[in-house]
Amino acid sequence: MKLGRLNHVGVATPTLDRAIAFWRETMGAEVIREPFDLPAQGVRVCFVDTPNGQVELLEPLGEDSPIAGFLAKNPLGGQHHLCFEVPEIHAAKAWFEGQGCRVLGEPRIGAHGTPIFFVHPKDMGGVLTEIMETPRDH
Ligand code: CO
């Protein structure tokens, strides 16, 4: 597998508005994208641009959101996942499965409009890892 760039760091938050204010006022972020719902993943998402990547703020969308469980253990929110780009999503899935890593579900369209999947943290040194096909316009 060819490991691509670190695309974003996923950060869970109980309140997206407050997290956006924190990134703007305390962290000095100048480019904060428009938040949007991603119902297929049970999250509301907001991307914060940094000079070399993005932070993906994640708020639960409904009580069965995967983020809701994370926030139950981490009420203030916190670092949720890392996302790396790969050239081809199905080849990457086959690669991780071949390494004995548990891929969580089938590839699906992620927050950037390209296919993604997650790999179980217990097979990834404790880090929930999102694998994302590189957008074509990069
Ligand atoms: Co992500």
Image: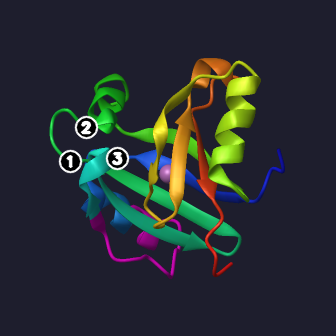
Q: Which residue is mark 1?
A: 61
For the residue with label 3, is its CB less than 8 Å from the closest atom of ligand 1? no
- Image spot of residue 130 (x, y percent): 57, 44
Q: Which residue is mark 3?
A: 13
Q: CA distance from mark 1 to mark 3?
A: 11 Å
Question: Looking at the image, which residue is at 66% across and 22% down?
Answer: 101
Q: Residues within 10 Å of mark 3 (few under 14, many from 20)?
A: many
How many numbered marks appear?
3
* Residue 52 against residue 43 in the figure, above or below: below
Q: How is the image coloured?
A: rainbow
Q: Secondary structure at mark 1?
A: loop
For the residue with label 1, is its CB less than 8 Å from the closest atom of ligand 1? no
Q: Nearer the viewer, residue 78 or 118?
A: 118
Residue 74: image quadrant is top left
Classify the position of the N terminus by image quarter. top right
* Residue 131 against residue 135 in the figure, above or below: above
Question: Looking at the image, which residue is at 80% across and 50% down?
Answer: 3
Q: Amino acid at mark 3?
A: Thr
Q: Nearer the viewer, residue 129 or 91?
A: 91
Question: Looking at the image, which residue is at 47% across and 38% down?
Answer: 106
Q: Which disc number belongs to residue 65?
A: 2
Q: CA distance from mark 3 to mark 2?
A: 12 Å
- Image spot of residue 23 (x, y percent): 45, 65
